[in-house]
Image (cartoon, grey):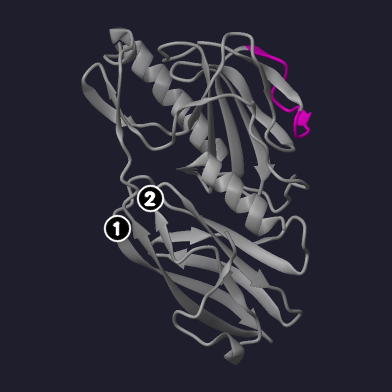
Amino acid sequence: MKLLFVLVLFVSSLFSFSIELSDSTIANGKTVLLEFSKDKNIKYDKIIIGKKKYKIYDNPIYKEKAYVLLPMSYYEKPSEKKVEIFYTENKDKKKRVLIFRVKDGKYEKEKIKVQSSKVNLRKEDKKRASKEYAEAMKIYRTSTKKSHISKEFIVPMKSKITSDFGKARVYNDTLKGYHSGTDFRAKIGTPIIASNDGIVVLAKDRFYSGNSVIIDHGQGIYSCYYHMSKFDVKKGNIVKRGESLGLSGDSGRVTGPHLHFSFRVGGEQVDPLQLIKLININLLK
């Protein structure tokens, strides 16, 4: 997938810097990459889409470029998105605008049978799950200017994918959301490795996701590894790509042992494999 030069609402030759968009049309739950050339007379400020603001970061590999990842919510409806780019050029505040479109991802439905206690929660379980969700969202909404990425992302294990991102989840005949990651077949005790360099910001047992590890890769990018049976890391550890995080298991709300692998970008849950491909091909090369 090669970056497309954006010529939607402007002619690039009229401006002192170029902008490249990874795709002019994207499905809900996917991510768009916007990349800028850097100029000593230009300071990028922010991006606004509707009511949402996005930070612009230096490319972790190529310092002459800047970028922003624009994650589309799974619940985003087909629409046309106006992207406003705010920047300062020679002390003058300016704005450029471009357009891309969100389409329906047409995700399938998936029926799952689990213990009724994992669907119809007791008051104490609801309280626990709510507290854990708030803790995780506080992490996901935190971003740093520094990136820990120096190489391409890899998958956490080589195994068959048993459930793709985005499938509508019907638990015990009741629709309860969607599949927020990618599931890898893994019997209990299968090694799980870090998808890239980063810092472990969470390693604990949780109600839904069981034994969970979250890695901060910097600049608002987080990878997540759920339903583990054993930890090889703890909160605060610095990990390298390919380093062992622990072993797969069947903890949390599951029908059997597997690894649930997911990503958050700017606090938004996105398709992990599409994001990895996007970053590896467009951002790091």
Disc 2 residue crowd, few under 14, some 14–19, many 20+, Cα 10 Å: many
Q: Amino acid at mark 2?
A: Asn
Compared with 193, 206 (above or below) is above
Q: Write down the residue under mark 1.
A: 78
User: Contact (CB < 8 A) between labels 1 and 2?
Assistant: yes
Instruction: Check disc 1 and report its element: helix, strand or loop.
Output: loop
Q: Does 238 sit above or below residue 114?
A: below
Query: Quick check: 16 above or below 65?
Result: below
Kindly identify the amino acid type of the residue bearing the numbered disc 1: Pro
Name the spot of residue 270 as percent of width and height, x first.
47, 43
Q: Is residue 185 left or right of residue 9?
A: right
Residue extending furthest toward the bottom: 14
For residue 232, say whether it is visible.
yes
Q: Would you name the residue on which mark 2 appears?
A: 28
Q: Residue at x 63, y 33 (%)?
A: 155
Task: Locate the N terminus by quadrant.
Answer: bottom right
Quadrant holding the C terminus: bottom right
The segment highlighted magenta reads 230-242
The residue drawn where x is 67% and y is 34% is 195
Q: Secondary structure at mark 2?
A: loop
Residue shown at 52% from the left, 66% from the top = 47
Horizontal relation, residue 202 to residue 240: left or right: left
Q: Earlier in the sequence, mark 1 or mark 2?
A: 2
- Whether the magenta-drawn stretch holds residue 238 is answered as yes
* Residue 145 picture location, percent across and down: 70, 54
